[in-house]
Structure formats: structure tokens, C-alpha cells
Image (spheres, rainbow, N blue to C red):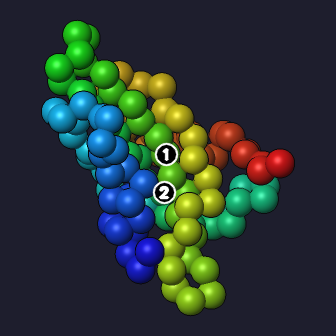
């Protein structure tokens, strides 16, 4: 993707089987430092809220986005956020700094 917004949209776009009342929200993008195998990049929280569920379903992830050599944004790290409220930039930075994920 060429922009962070396009990357977030592609990853979080509702699928045909998803609930029709799902809302997707993204936090403010913040700079995140390198950690282990993960280069410095941009962190953003993406939350999906389904209001028809009782209690409402909130699923959140923190994404570490890094540009490649062509300037295209790539997702380098995805971490689940276990909070009941929509995560802010502080939560994104904390989650991406605490968990090193390594692909097999």
C-alpha cells in the first residue's frame, strides 16, 4: 500500500461473513522504535466494534508499519490489544514495545 490509511483499510475491511454493523476505528499513528527483529516504524491501533453483540464486541490490534525500499507500507508486526476501550497511542507503543514477535 502507498499510505498507512490504505494499509489499515485493506487489513480491516469487513469480509462478506462479517457483521453488517461492524465499525472500524484507527488510532493516531505514532513513531515506534526498533525492537528485536522489528525495525523502527509507525504504530497504529485498529479496533473493530460490533454493537449488535451484547456486550458489544471490541477486537483490537496494534500494527507496526514499516516502509520498504519503494516507500510502500508493510505490516511488520501485529499484536492483540486486550483492553475494553479503544486503544490510544500510549497503548499501541506499550504493546509493540513489550512483545517481540518472530515469524517461523
Secondary structure state at the residue bearing disc 2: strand
Q: Position of residue 38 (x, y in %)?
A: 71, 60
Q: Position of residue 9 (x, y in %)?
A: 33, 59
Residues 100 and 58: in front is 58
Secondary structure state at the residue bearing disc 1: strand
Residue at point 61%, 53% (across, down): 77
Q: Which residue is outermost to the front?
A: 16
Quadrant placement of the N terminus: bottom left
Q: Is residue 35 above or below residue 49?
A: below
Q: Which mark is residue 26?
A: none
79 relative position to 56: left or right: right
Which of the 4 quarters of the picture holds residue 70? bottom right
Residue, disc 1: 62
Residue 13 in view of the camera: yes
Q: Is residue 104 above or below residue 55?
A: below
Residue, disc 2: 43
The answer to whether the residues at label 2 and label 1 have Cβ atoms under 8 Å apart is yes
Q: Which residue is outermost to the top?
A: 54
Give the mark, 2 or 1, whose residue is nearer the N terminus: 2
Spatial CA span between label 2 and label 1: 7 Å
67 relative position to 58: left or right: right
Residue at point 41%, 25% (across, down): 83
Dot 2 crowding, Cα within 10 Å, few <14, some 14–19, many 20+: many
Residue at point 62%, 60% (across, down): 76
Total number of numbered discs in the rendering:
2
32 relative position to 3: left or right: right
103 relative position to 27: left or right: right
Amino acid at each position: 500500500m502507498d499510505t498507512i490509511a490504505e494499509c489499515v483499510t485493506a487489513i480491516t475491511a469487513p469480509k462478506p461473513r462479517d457483521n453488517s454493523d461492524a465499525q472500524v476505528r484507527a488510532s493516531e499513528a505514532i513513531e515506534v522504535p526498533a525492537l528485536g527483529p522489528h525495525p523502527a516504524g509507525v504504530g497504529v491501533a485498529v479496533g473493530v466494534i460490533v454493537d449488535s453483540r451484547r456486550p458489544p464486541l471490541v477486537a483490537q490490534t496494534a500494527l507496526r508499519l514499516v516502509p520498504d525500499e519503494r516507500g510502500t507500507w508493510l505490516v511488520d508486526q501485529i499484536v492483540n490489544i486486550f483492553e475494553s476501550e479503544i486503544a490510544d497511542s500510549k497503548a499501541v507503543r506499550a504493546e509493540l514495545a513489550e512483545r517481540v514477535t518472530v515469524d517461523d
